[in-house]
Amino acid sequence: MLLMKSNRKILLVALLALVAFVQAHAESKEEQKQIASAKQNIAPNEIYSGNEKSLLNVWDTENADEELPSSDIYETWTNEKVNPYKIAIKNLPDLQLDSLLTTYNHPLDSGAVTSDFGPRKRRFHYGIDLRVSVGQDVYAAFDGKVRVTDCDKYGYGKFVVIRHSNGLETLYGHLSEILVEANQYVSAGDRIGLGGNTGRSTGPHLHFEFRYLGNAINPAKIIDFERNVPMFDQYLVSSKTSFKEILAYQAVKYHTVKKGDTLSSIAARYGTTVKRLCQLNGIKSTTTLRLKQRIRYS
């Protein structure tokens, strides 16, 4: 009798365990259905908290191919090189930057301009330098997708390139730390890195660039860096008006001094005058030329 009661007890426990398993399996399937349904309707970067299941960055994996920012402008998506496009300025199509400009978020909470866009002694500075403290937060300027994270120890140092749906790409250089990954979607104001002094840098600063199809645009044509806000709701990027500094720099030509060269022989070779060479190079007609010295002649 006692044995029969014991067997019934064991059978009852097993039956209850089976019921619990079936019920849990059904709840799990229902949970999966809810999450799948949420994935279909979720907005990029939205968090679905049902049953504590996070769907952050569903956009990254679900729609990566068709949701590339500015896919109607850019035919190439690569995680290498700042400018993989190699399109000459004269061949750039005009681009009307739309009202997304109004969503601009300044990349720093504070930081004055320390160096402007434009030519330097022997090279061109393709961005704006902003004063920064090492470890200071650096933010994305617009919504977009991270295209490049890399370290160029002879140039940008640790840097990030983001492509945006308004057609621009922005670059953030000399970071001490990168906080995002390639192919990650970010929103304007998201932290993407920390200020630093890496790469070709003589002191902590943020090197900040605007590029369109690989070609640098002076950010100060679009952003008021005293108030840190856009100057326009809309801006037309045009090969005729937006790249004057670079085109002027590219038009500059130099002669490298060789043995026997004089200002007179250089002037005759390039169809100019000694007076003009002196004006362009800030020298006098009596200046002694050095071997391998670069003399600007146009």
Image (cartoon, rainbow, N blue to C red):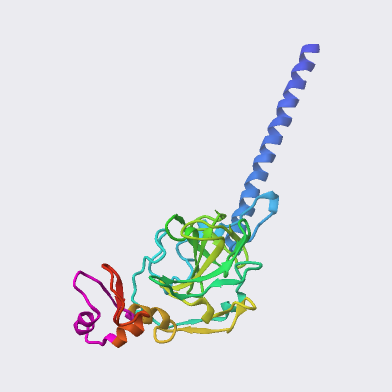
Residue ID at (65%, 44%): 28
Q: Quadrant of the C terminus?
A: bottom left
63 to 117, vertically: above or below: above
22 to 8, vertically: above or below: below
The quadrant in which residue 195 appears is bottom right
Percent of width and height locating residue 242: 44, 83
Residue ID at (38%, 70%): 122
**Does residue 1 appear anywhere in the picture?**
no
Q: Quadrant of the N terminus?
A: top right
| Numbered range of the magenta stretch | 251-274
In the picture, measured across the screen, residue 124 lies left or right of residue 21, that is left
In the picture, measured across the screen, residue 52 lies left or right of residue 183, that is right
Percent of width and height locating residue 171: 49, 66
**Does residue 219 appear anywhere in the picture?**
yes
Percent of width and height locating residue 173: 51, 62
Residue ID at (68%, 40%): 24
Residue ID at (42%, 81%): 245
Percent of width and height locating residue 11: 72, 23
Who is closer to the viewer here, 84 or 279? 279
The quadrant in which residue 135 appears is bottom right
Residue 36 part of the magenta-drawn span: no
Q: Residue lying farthest front?
A: 286
Residue 252 part of the magenta-drawn span: yes
104 to 149, vertically: above or below: below
